[in-house]
Amino acid sequence: NNVPNPSRDCCIAPKSVFQRAMSDKIGQGIRDLCNCLRVARPSLGFHQDKEARLPGACGIKTSFSMELCVHGPLTLNQNKN
């Protein structure tokens, strides 16, 4: 939150998390990631605008709208197993 762009070291974990979420073929991984980011934001002190720009700042290509992920409504886990 205090620097304009994250360092390369700071991008390692998000790259892994985003890749893992996007590897889920039914989309539940993306929903879970977005919900986690929204729920954890207050306790982690993340700023919404920087959170939405994180993939671009870290060179992460997403298969979904990060704006919608950050600002969209919370959804319940729809896993029906």
Image (tube, rainbow, N blue to C red):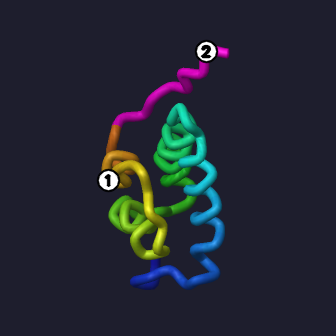
Give coordinates of residue 32: x percent, y percent: 55, 39
Q: Who's the residue at 58% across and 74% down the image?
A: 11
* Count of marks overlaid on the render: 2
Image position, residue 74 (x, y; %):
42, 34
Which residue is at 63% across, 51% downward? 20
Residue at 46% over, 74% down: 59
Tell which of 2 and 79 is nearer to you.
79
* Of 42 and 68, the residue lying toward us: 68
Q: Is residue 24 above or below residue 11?
A: above
Disc 2 marks which amino acid? Lys
The C terminus, quarter of image:
top right
* Residues packed near mark 1 inside 10 Å, few (<14), some (14 to 19) or many (20 plus): few
Amino acid type for the residue under numbered disc 1: Glu
Residue 57, percent from left and from top: 42, 75
Q: Which residues are magenta?
A: 73-81
Look at the numbered disc 1 and give the secondary structure of its residue: helix
Above or below, 29 against 44 in this view is above
